[in-house]
Image (cartoon, rainbow, N blue to C red):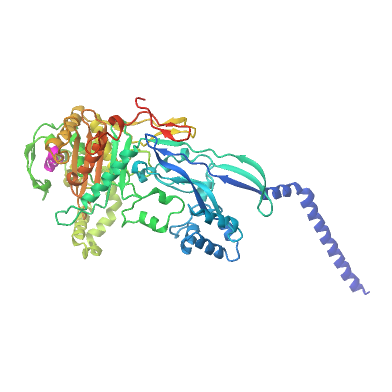
Amino acid sequence: MSDRSRRRLLVIQVLTLSLIITLAGRLWQMQVASGDKYARAATENQVREVIVPATRGLILDSAGRPLVANRSSLVVSVDRSVVGRQKDRGAAVLDRLAKLIDMDRTLLSELIRLCAPGVGQPCWNGSPYTPIPVAQDVDQRVALQILERAEDYPGITAQLETVRSYPRPAGANAAHIVGYLGPVTEFEAAHSDVLGLRDLVGRAGLEKQYDDYLRGTPGVHAVAVDHLGRVVQTLDEAEQVAGSHLVTTIDARVQAVTEQALRDAMHRARTQPDYKGRLFKGDSGAVVVMDVTDGSIIAMASSPTFDPNDWVGSISPSKYQHMTSAKAGYPLVGQAFQGGAPPGSTFKPVSAAGAAKAGYRLNATYGCTSSFQVGNRAFKNFDSLSYGPITVAYALQVSCDTVFYRLAYDMWIKDGGNKPVDHPKDPMFNMAREFGLGKRTGIDLPNESPGRVPDRPWKLAYWRATKDELCRRAETGYPERAKKEPARAAFLTQFAKENCKEGWKLRAYDAVNFSIGQGDLMLTPLQLTRVYAAIANGGTLWQPRIGKAIVGPDGTVIKELKPKKSGKIDAPASALSYIRKALVGTALNGTSRGVFRGWPLDKFPMGSKTGTSEIFGKQPRSWFAAFGPDNSPRYAIVMTVSQGGTGSGTSGPSVRKILEALMGLGEHKQPVIEDRKPPKGLPTMRVDGTFAPPKRGQ
């Protein structure tokens, strides 16, 4: 063997020896030095956590009737992580499943795709690693086929689960009150110590507001599995804790009557012609029933509405599109506390209180002419009627606009007119703030609208935000609107010209429009109901509430949600009393006389006010407010119908129907609420988990 060959052999031997030493060292490190670490990792790789969702608490009305309950359902779910590992990425499995559960294949794919920017509904907003429910209430034969032929349906499960139920006691829907549920997102789960990836959380209404109480705590079972994924041992168990129950101030029977009354009002509007001979559209509406003694909401309805049961499991694309459609009127929006509009003449009691605080005598006489001139514009009285010199009380009863125009204009002049004094008093605007307008009432529902009081600070802020666009439009106009809406385009152009440089000023027309609830003023029906509740109870503003108590799963009262006062109206008590008595007279000799024809006003005197607000480009909006009985005030009710006509013709008759139910009149032989008063006590849990009504006298 040559020296060269020997050298080559030696190199190979050295390399081989080096590799052997390296492998031996690595083996020693893994088996000895890091043996414990890898042993633990191997064990951990065989441990799985099984999440057991907690039973969600009930939502009850004041008598213990379940507005929201639970029921069992056979649910089919798809595990994306398993299906996606198939050779064809799960196409064959999903094809078989779609046929089995009789679902469109495209829809099935959409239901299990992950929500992301640019991905529309339906989609899955929860974790991609948790099974996604795609069908509920499936037939037992379907579930058995999935279980017995597991090799044909890898990643597909069918099991009995507890799902949310909305039983509609007495026919009450209450969708915007109770809300609905949705899956937990990965972000929520990652930033929460209590949320699991299979949990459902409240997404709207009381379900969202009181989610922490209702949800409970899910159970977690740690199990050991073999390499085939079969459970071989339970290592640890943390049992689920059921959620607590929520008792509300809602009365399901009153809620059902209220919802029907609103439907009747909207139908009534659609059968009546406007001044052009067109039927009113009656496209949306709302109504609120409040206890004036503590701010409790007895009933509240909005239209258009939706069925909360549609959200149980996976909502269909067509239903979701309908619920979020402008054409359908945005059914998910609770018009009672999230919508807003000028309240028309129902606002006049606030203006009257502002005038009284400013020193104007309400029992003095003011001219009710057919119109009132402001600059080069004549502000007309409704239907151009003239009543001559009248008191503010009679102006409220017959809804005379020009009396309030005169008062507002006089106040505006005293504040300096177009050259305001350093500290203008703005009595009517400030009185609106006194009644809590322009901010949220604090009701225990999410996403409440604050409304709008267009006073001087608001005018300035709005002008600053829109100045550049106003000045641009003052030059260019609105050519894109001119062909189809010439009147609207001309109006907007003139508005832009007037407000380009000095749009921050409070003009005379702003003041007079505000006095009768028009212009840029915007209230929710809930806010206006609180105004009338304060007039009825002597000036106390209550924070509206729906939650009454939190009751544990064993029936123990955990927390009572007491009524809260928001403040006292800073107005002369004599003025509030005067306004209240004036409103009681509206049913006798004012615009509510037709609504209360045949009503036993001697036994149940009722305060009321009609309203018809104007919104450019739309038909008039109907408003009606009432409170009573005046000899022992208990309830305040406000109803509104968008593009619904007059308050007395559309909303008034339906408010009367609600009052009849509360008082036990008309078709109701007995009041729907015993003693005509909401119960003070709480429902009590029976041994079977249902609830008995509270005992009267508690």
Position in image of residue 376 (x %, y %)? 10, 50
* Magenta span of residues: 395-408
Position in image of residue 85 (x %, y %)? 60, 61
Picture quadrant where residue 633 is located: top left
- Give the residue displayed 14% in from the left and 33% down from the top: 360
Is 85 included in the stretch rendered in magenta?
no
Specify whether 383 is left or right of 527: left
Q: Height in image: 279 above or below 337?
A: below
Which residue appears farthest toward the front when viewing the image? Answer: 141
Is 401 included in the stretch rendered in magenta?
yes
Position in image of residue 353 (x %, y %)? 19, 34
The front one of 680 and 672 is: 672
The front one of 253 and 638 is: 253
Position in image of residue 407 (x %, y %)? 14, 38
Picture quadrant where residue 179 is located: top left
- Give the residue displayed 11% in from the left and 37% down from the top: 589
SS majority, magenta: helix
Residue 236 showing in the rendered view: yes
The front one of 401 and 29 is: 401
Q: Height in image: 184 above or below 669?
A: below
